Image (cartoon, rainbow, N blue to C red):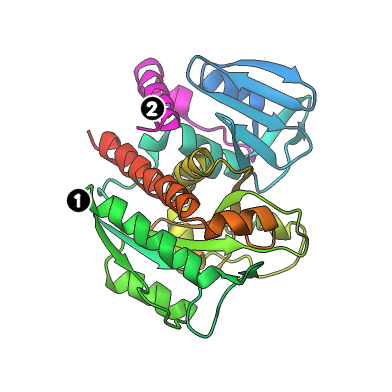
Amino acid sequence: MHLTTRQLFISQVVLLAGSGASALAAPASKMVSLSYIARLYSMSSTMSGKKVVMKNKWNRIEVEINSRRAWVNGVMVWLHHPCRKSGSKWALRELDFKKGIDPILRSYAYVPTKLPKMVVLDPGHGGRDPGAVGLGKVYEKKAVLSIANRVKAHLESKKIAVRMTRTSDASLTLKERNDYASKAGADLYISIHADSAGTASAHGVETFIMTVADCDSTNHYGKSGNKSARRGNQYDAANAVLGFSLQSNLVKRSKRSDRGLRRARFAVLKDAPCPAALVECGFLSNPEEAALIMDANYREAVARGISNGILGYITLVNRARK
């Protein structure tokens, strides 16, 4: 088991044993103070530069003040809203606590009771849509299919059923991908991509999950747009558990910089029939990462990160059921 998964599970057991129902109930207000969060998890709390650092023997939370960035056990987690002062105390929006931080640290209270048996992998793009194209003619559609095939093999070696939205260089609409996941009876749905940016300096790996209703997506903060609830919002808390497991393992295996667990209203997330995430395995617009993605060893490392993230989530569900 990945170290992060083990740490989270141990902390969950301790919290269950040592906390009553009233202690675990979230405050009724729309803000949750960091001091409350520290007490909930029996953590010490100190100020370090621009961060409030809360930690106990098992876990560490860092929240950057006047910022949407937080870190759980060293992995970046983007909040929907900045940490702000509420009265005299630093606080998070209640939804960032209930649908972000708390599910990651107390997954047993949020994951579905059904053990995931069918994983649907979605290699992005394909056919007429090459996706991003990097230096040396690195095509996203080819790279992510290679990664998805490796993830499939790793999961099947653990007796987990896997289907793929495409197994060849085929063109699929976004609706067809979601329809396939629904018809296949997906319990988990992972879309695999490689990133691109307008600058060659952008680098690192990131994982996206569905944005909570009425909130801004991470990369569109402060912009107008449709923020209504969608099918994928049924799984907000489980998405946070899945996304964190994927991102923490992806960072560990890829050894690339951590761009964080982010929120987006991508079509494959909005209309997902189950907990879902979209992973970005590096930037094809970055010469170093484009070269890495061409390397079979790197694609194998990324595939191991994704499969370990999926297995970590399944482990948490299995333990929550006992």
Please give the name of the residue rendered at 58% of the width and 64% of the height, measured from the top-left corner.
265
Q: Nearer the viewer, residue 282 or 57?
A: 282
x then y, percent, for residue 180: 34, 75
In front: label 2 or label 1: 1
Asked whether residue 79 is in view, the answer is yes
Q: Magenta span: helix, strand or loop, mainly?
A: helix
Above or below, comparing residue 170 to residue 218 in the picture: below
Quadrant of the frame with the N terminus = top left
Q: Secondary structure at mark 2?
A: helix
Please give the name of the residue rendered at 65% of the width and 26% of the height, measured from the top-left corner.
34
x then y, percent, for residue 100: 54, 42
The residue beneath circle 1 is 159
Residue 61 inside the magenta-drawn segment: no
Q: Nearer the viewer, residue 122 or 168?
A: 168
Above or below, comparing residue 43 to residue 62 in the picture: above
How many numbered markers are drawn? Answer: 2
Above or below, comparing residue 186 to residue 107 in the picture: below
Q: Could you say which quadrant of the image residue 276 lies in?
A: bottom left
The numbered disc on residue 6 is: 2
Q: Secondary structure at mark 1?
A: loop
Compared across the picture, whether 305 is left or right of 81 comes to left
Residue 25 inside the magenta-drawn segment: yes
Quadrant of the frame with the C terminus = top left
Q: Residue furthest bottom?
A: 128
How far is mark 2 from mark 1, CA to CA?
22 Å
Q: Amino acid at mark 1?
A: Lys
Q: Which residues are magenta?
A: 1-30
Please give the name of the residue rendered at 38% of the width and 18% of the height, measured from the top-left corner.
14
Q: Nearer the viewer, residue 131 or 268?
A: 131
x then y, percent, for residue 156: 24, 54
Compared across the picture, whether 161 is left or right of 133 comes to left
Crowding at mark 1 (Cα within 10 Å: few <14, some 14-19, many 20+): few
